[in-house]
């Protein structure tokens, strides 16, 4: 869970329009995965705004990153990365909540999921999802995986050439997210084998797939997009040879 109070937040700006805030996030007090929210600054029909993916608890760092921009959309990138959706919605009541099929059942009765995606495995544009207020030049695209155990929802921001995922890929150990906190633990040796260059990595991704045949279309759709960096929720951002590493991890689905 998130430490309370949440400290040790690390900001990174992979591109001028993409800001990430990483922090410690530990499961069972042992497994140190780290967490990361992504804030994408974009143009809307009403002016500048922000698109927030996998929000962590709101902090002063979040406020600084937004720099006064209104939050237009809050996206849950799967059915387990939704812990702070409601707290952000309370702070930004005009923002629209976006997530995969099943997210509605995880929200409070009085909180609406404005866009619940049930069109699986296709590459969908912002307009396909009814986000008609996002400027075309931002080139947002999404793929929701029906064959993933938690209905992974990947986001591509074409203007920045950045792909944002939750559990579709991890790049452990979460050295950046724990760089301002103690990160030793009995699982450190295992997490060292879960970076994108390690042989164990593809097997972890496969464990989260419930239907590998269904995954193929979506993976091929993502592979066709022109991304240069991959922002993951758990572990370090993939900034070098990101496309090649993506294709290597999912090579069995791309054949």
Image (cartoon, grey):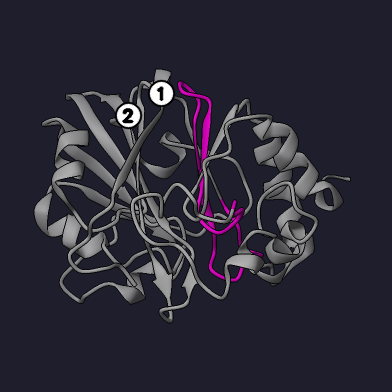
Q: Quadrant of the N terminus?
A: bottom left
Residue 54, x across and y down, in percent: 37, 54
Instruction: Kindly identify the residue that appears in the image at 35 percent across and 57 percent down.
Output: 181
- Mark 2 and mark 1 residues within 8 Å of each other at the beta carbon: yes
The magenta stretch is 144-171
Q: Is residue 140 magenta?
A: no
Disc number for residue 30: none
Is 49 positioned to the left or the right of 155 in the image?
left
What secondary structure predominates along the stretch shown in magenta? loop
The residue at the far top in this view is: 137
**51 shown above or below 206:** above
Q: Quadrant of residue 113?
A: bottom left
State the image coordinates of residue 3 (x, y, percent, origin top left).
27, 68
Which residue, given by chain and number where applicable, does mark 1 sit on? 138
Q: Secondary structure at mark 2?
A: loop
Q: Position of residue 161 (x, y in %)?
A: 53, 25
| Mark 1 nearby-residue class (10 Å; few <14, some 14–19, many ≥20) | some
Q: Nearer the viewer, residue 66 or 85?
A: 66
Q: Nearer the viewer, residue 3 or 113?
A: 3
Please give the label number shown on residue 134.
Answer: 2
Q: Is residue 166 magenta?
A: yes
Q: Quadrant of the C terminus?
A: top right
């Amino acid at each position: 869970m998130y430490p309370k109070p949440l400290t040790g937040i690390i900001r990174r700006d992979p591109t001028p329009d993409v800001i990430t805030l990483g922090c410690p996030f530990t499961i069972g007090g042992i497994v140190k995965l780290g967490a990361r929210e992504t804030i994408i600054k974009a143009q809307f029909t009403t002016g500048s705004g922000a698109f927030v993916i996998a929000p962590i608890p709101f902090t002063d760092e979040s406020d600084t990153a937004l720099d006064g921009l209104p939050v237009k959309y809050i996206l849950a990138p799967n059915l387990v990365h939704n812990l702070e959706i409601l707290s952000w919605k309370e702070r930004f009541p005009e923002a629209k909540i976006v997530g995969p099929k099943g997210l509605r059942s995880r929200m409070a009765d009085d909180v609406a999921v404005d866009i619940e995606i049930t069109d699986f495995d296709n590459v969908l544009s912002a307009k396909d999802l009814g986000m008609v207020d996002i400027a075309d030049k931002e080139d947002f695209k999404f793929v929701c995986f029906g064959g993933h155990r938690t209905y992974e929802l990947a986001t591509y921001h074409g203007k920045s050439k950045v792909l944002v995922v939750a559990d579709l890929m991890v790049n452990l150990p979460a050295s950046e997210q724990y760089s301002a906190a103690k990160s030793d633990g009995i699982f450190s040796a295992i997490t060292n084998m879960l970076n994108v260059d390690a042989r164990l990595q593809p097997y972890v991704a496969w464990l989260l797939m419930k239907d590998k045949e269904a995954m193929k279309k979506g993976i091929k759709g993502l592979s066709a997009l022109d991304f240069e960096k991959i922002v993951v929720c758990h572990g370090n951002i993939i900034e070098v040879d990101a496309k090649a590493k993506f294709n290597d991890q999912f090579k069995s689905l791309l054949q």
